[in-house]
Amino acid sequence: MLGEILLTAGALILLFLGWQLWWNDAIMAGQQSSAASDLSAQWLEEGRAARGDTAPPEPQDYGDPVVGAADHADGDAFAVMYVPRFGDDSQRRIAEGISLDVLNSTYLGVGHYPDTQMPGGVGNFAIAAHRSAYGGGMHEIDQLQLGDAIYIQTEDAWYTYRFRDLEYVTPEAVDVLAPVPHHPGLAPTDRLITLTSCNPLYSTAERIIAYGVLESWQPSTAGPPAEIADVVATWES
């Protein structure tokens, strides 16, 4: 009898902890998404103001991408990430640094590895987020498919990266952050993005790494890429 009671109590505790983890994660995900929408909307309005009354220009070749200065203080939000594969409400602020103050924040959630490239630059723009808990900014990273878009918005521009490859490494494999991943001695020629998170779910045993390459960019005055314009418009409502 006592054994059955203990088993039942243990099961109830596990169910409660699981519910609490899921519930807190869902709440934080909503807060992070809302905060990212607010920042994106601010930059969209600034872009329209700079453009004036004219309509957004037709898509064109804007030449080499604008690359923002790498002088952000730890915790400063300087970009927004949106990955359609992660869901319509997957937008997250990207802040400088990968401390828990960034990754566990109710309004940030994605951190930029210091000393890696800025969005659009030649080299490796490397970022990190949780897969589970604290908003789970990269919960679906393992579901990325070849060619999936990874959109990065800054105050100055929109950058469209395309997913290319996925790998699993040990936590010590920091060479994935090199300008040319796994080849720290080589000079980069490509404009890369690297997404990093823990693997498997609810564990820090290894890291899951997703790589992408820059496909195109456009200034803020041109508005968001046409493929996501309707979704981005909802962030301002």
Image: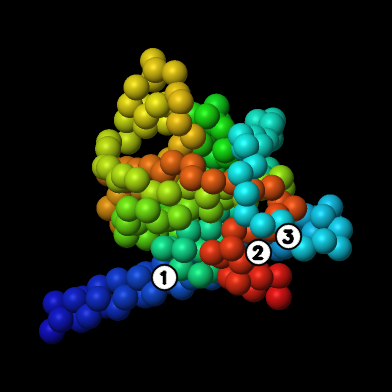
The location of residue 53, given as percent across then percent down, is 86, 63
Task: Please name the residue that numbered disc 2 is placed on.
Answer: 37
Label 2 vs 3, first from the N-terminus: 2
Label 2 vs 1, first from the N-terminus: 1
Relative horizontal placement of residue 198, taking residue 78 as reference (left or right): left
Amino acid at circle 2: Ser
Considering every residue shown, the one lying at the far top of the view is 185
**Alpha-carbon span between mark 2 and mark 3:** 20 Å
Is residue 202 something that shows in the picture?
Answer: no
Under circle 2, the secondary element is helix
In which image quadrant can residue 223 be found?
bottom right
Q: Residue at x 57, y 38 (%)?
A: 120
Task: Please name the residue that numbered disc 1 is placed on.
Answer: 22
Label 3 vs 1, first from the N-terminus: 1
- From this view, report whether residue 124 is shown above or below residue 137: above
**Alpha-carbon span between mark 2 and mark 1:** 22 Å
Amino acid at circle 1: Trp
Task: Please name the residue that numbered disc 3 is placed on.
Answer: 56
The location of residue 139, given as percent across then percent down, is 39, 59
